[in-house]
Amino acid sequence: MEGQAGQPDELSLLTPRRAADALGCSVNTVYRLVAQGELKTVDIAPAASKRPKARIRRGDLEAFINARAQGTAS
């Protein structure tokens, strides 16, 4: 399956807003998950930028979801 610009989905980058939409939560929850180290991000800001520009790999989001799903399986 391919995402944006012909990239495989696992390489597609999502904004925190898109990740929040996919998880059904708020953007603040996504940032909290990132701060707690539960969800990985990629900083796409230029090296000289003083502000990070976080993106989440689709594959990392799927891994997070799968880890949570495995914890609730009965």
Image (spheres, grey):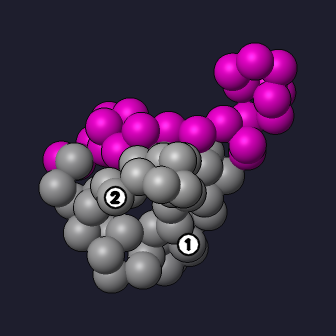
User: Per the image, is 32 magenta?
Assistant: no
Mark 1 element type: helix
Examine the rendering and report whether any part of residue 11 can be seen.
yes
Examine the rendering and report whether any part of residue 61 can be seen.
no
The mark found on residue 67 in the picture is: 1
Mark 2 element type: loop
- Is the residue marked by circle 1 packed among few (<14), some (14-19), or many (20+) residues within 10 Å? few
Q: Residue at x 52, y 47 (%)?
A: 46
Query: For the magenta stretch, what is the residue range?
Result: 1-26
Closer to us: 70 or 50: 50
The mark found on residue 50 in the picture is: 2
Upstream in sequence: badge 2 or badge 1: 2
User: Per the image, is 4 magenta?
Assistant: yes
Q: Position of residue 35 (x, y in %)?
A: 31, 75
The kind of residue on which mark 2 rests is: Lys
Instruction: Please indicate whether residue 60 sits to the left or right of residue 50 in the image.
Output: right
The kind of residue on which mark 1 rests is: Ala
Q: Position of residue 69 (x, y in %)?
A: 50, 66
Instruction: Please indicate whether residue 42 sits to the left or right of residue 10 in the image.
Output: left
Q: Quadrant of residue 3?
A: top right
Q: Residue at x 61, y 45 (%)?
A: 58
Q: Residue at x 24, y 69 (%)?
A: 32
Q: Quadrant of residue 4?
A: top right
